[in-house]
Image (cartoon, grey):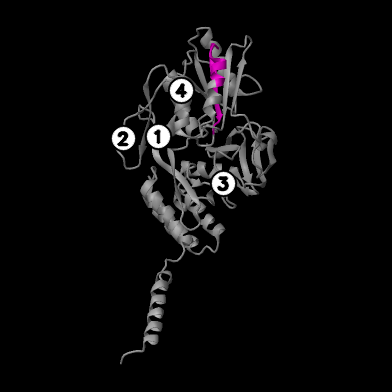
Amino acid sequence: MRLPASARRRFLQGASALLVARPSAVRAAPAGPATDFDAFCRAIDEGYAYLDRPGDWKAARARWRPRAAAAKDRAGLIAALEGLIAELEDHHVGLDAHNPGSPRPVPAATDLWGEWVDGEARIVAVRAGSVADSVGLHPGQRVVSVGGVAVEAAVRARLPRSRQSNRVARDFALCRLLAGPWAGMLSIEARGSAGVRRFDVERSDAPPAALPPIIARRIGEDRDLGYLRLKNNLGDPGLLAHFDAALGYLKDTRGLLVDLRETQSGGSPAVAVQVLARFAKVEMPWIVRTPRGAAAPSPQRVVPRGPFAYEAPVAVLVDRWTAGEGESLAIGLATVSSATLIGTPMAGLRGDLREVRLPGSELVARFPGTKVMLVNGTAREAVRPTLAVDLAAPSGGPGDPILYQGLKFLEANRLGSTRTPRG
């Protein structure tokens, strides 16, 4: 039976409408929390350069995925991701934003560093001028409790059963515990020479005040020593102009202290190598960066830059807040200008960062995808200062014990002494 022309037109119009509508009918559902969780896991599987416990990682994924799948909102997803991230026990893995519910990143937003020593949780470093410093916490104290919970129990609660007795895991959990919340009060009981005392550390979520990127001064009795302090700006290419001006001001000093104790932000390899190039006299290798799965490449080389290279002895001041490219610059100065590293162990952040943007939430996660080593094969995170300073029992009286040892070292060098001052 042949349809009338008007009926055929209505049929074709209806069919066309269905064909147009079909793509939207089969369009993929928006990515949800479980999809984002899986995307993060794939990125770690494929690109994380330090996946040295694959069995533990697989078990951790299985534990945290149901929580991500059940998440009703962004906060629930973040909680699941942060729980999984903590099980990697790597301070260089995290979400690249200040999210409610995320922990303060170590060391960038913390003021205390703790370690287990002889079975006790000890404070080994306190960031100078911080809230923790101002209330009286200091290196050498034994932590008794945090937030009203015995420190041993609080640390165990943060660790899976398989990692309860592992030293690396326990140190990681202790630092995260002492980091505390982004804002509010953290009560810490610590034992010192006068017994146990409670310290209330009230942290603020306010952004830090703007500071100059570099401090450059002439110091010493004759004002013939240079002091150059970089302040958390190794990720900013604009630092280079300030650095060049500062080094020009100090170029005729008989010794230089390069203070890297405020370089905790991660930074940029491109900026670090350009700073280092002002100390290089000849082109030479200085560091090796190896992405996961790649054969060991040739060492990266530093090329002299600028009208002069600094010639006098250099001492580099480091501590737990020397991190990321601050650590690279410290070991580069030791390689290129025979600088002496003075202070405590550095942050020990592993590798260079890469990032992945999760499709649904658009959260950005960062993790080290490239191993960083010295030319001799030593991992960057394993480097220790040549002249160690014991902050719990410093020499030289009150003040800044690391700066004191740096000055003492340069004075000994000026006098031609072959003795190394003891910290």
Give yes or no for contact between labels 3 and 2 (Cβ–Cβ under 8 Å): no
Q: Label 3 vs label 2: CA separation?
A: 41 Å
Residue 115, picture quadrant:
top right
Specify the quadrant that holds the N terminus: bottom left
Tag 4: residue type? Leu
Q: Secondary structure at mark 3?
A: helix
Given the current orientation, which residue lies at the most extreme bottom position? Answer: 1
Q: Which residue is mark 1?
A: 372
Residue at the outermost front position: 5
Mark 1: amino acid: Val
Q: Does residue 249 show up magenta in the picture?
A: yes
Q: Secondary structure at mark 1?
A: strand
Residue 353: name its quadrant: top left
Q: Residue at x 42, y 57 (%)?
A: 38
Question: Where are the magenta residues, as a range?
Answer: 245-263
In the displayed structure, 136 sits above or below 215; it is: below
Mark toward the start of the polypeptide (3 vs 1): 3
Please tell me how many numbered marks the rendered image carries: 4
- Locate the C terminus by quadrant: top right
Q: Are marks 4 and 3 in contact (CB under 8 Å)?
A: no
Pointer 3 with pointer 1, Cβ within 8 A: no
Residue with the mark numbered 3: 152
* Residue denoted by label 2: 296
Q: State which tag comes first along the sequence, 4 or 1.
A: 4
Question: Which is in the foreground here, disc 3 or disc 2?
Answer: 2
Residue 326 at x, y = what percent? Answer: 50, 31
